Amino acid sequence: MYTIYHNPRCKKSRAGLQFVKDRTEDFEVVEYLKNPLTKKDLELVFMKLNKKPLEMVRTQEAIYKSNFKGKNFTDGEWIKIILENPKLLKRPIVVNKHKAVWGDPAEELEIFFNNNK
C-alpha cells in the first residue's frame, strides 16, 4: 500500500499521482492542504524520507521568503512551521510501509517503485 501526499494544484504533484496510478491500484491519496498531517505523521514521513524538515521546505514560496528565509530553526520548529503552513511542504511525497520518496524529479519515483516491489 502506498500513500501519496498530493496537491492537485501542483503540476509536479499531478504528474507524481499519474505515475503512481500507472503502476499500482494499491494507493491512497492524501490532499494534505485539505486534510493536514499531524505532527506524528510528518515526523514519520521525514524519518522514512531520511531527510531533515528543512530539506523538504519549498523555499520559493512567498511565505518562506517573507517569514523564514535566513532564520535558523530546529527540526521541531520546522515541523511546527510546516504544520502551520502546509503549502511549504515539497510534493509529491510517496510513502510505503518502510520508505518514502519526494517525487521531484519524477525519476526518483521510478527508482522508488523499482526498489520497493
Image: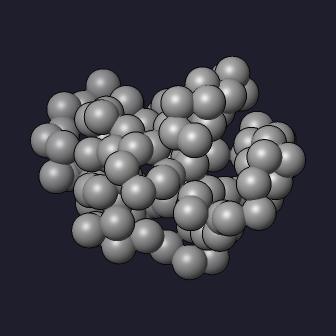
Q: How many marks?
A: 0
Q: How is the protein colored in the picture?
A: one colour
Q: Is residue 48 above or below residue 39?
A: above
Which residue is pictured at 27% across the width and 45% down the height? 47
Tell me where residue 24 sits by quadrant. Answer: bottom right
**Residue 76 image offset from top left, x and y in percent:** 16, 52
State the residue in front, 68 or 42: 42
Specify the quadrant that holds the C terminus: top right
Which residue is pictured at 37% across the width and 30% down the height? 55
Q: Is residue 84 above or below residue 68?
A: below
State the residue in front, 42 or 74: 42
Q: Is residue 110 visible?
A: yes
Q: Is residue 20 above or below residue 83?
A: above
State the residue in front, 25 or 11: 25
Q: Is residue 44 above or below residue 31?
A: above
Which residue is pictured at 45% across the width and 43% down the height? 100
**Residue 114 image offset from top left, x and y in percent:** 61, 30
**Residue 75 image offset from top left, x and y in percent:** 18, 43
Drawn side of residue 98 relative to residue 90, left or right = left
* Residue at the limit of the structure toward the front, as seen here: 117
Specify the quadrant that holds the N terminus: bottom right
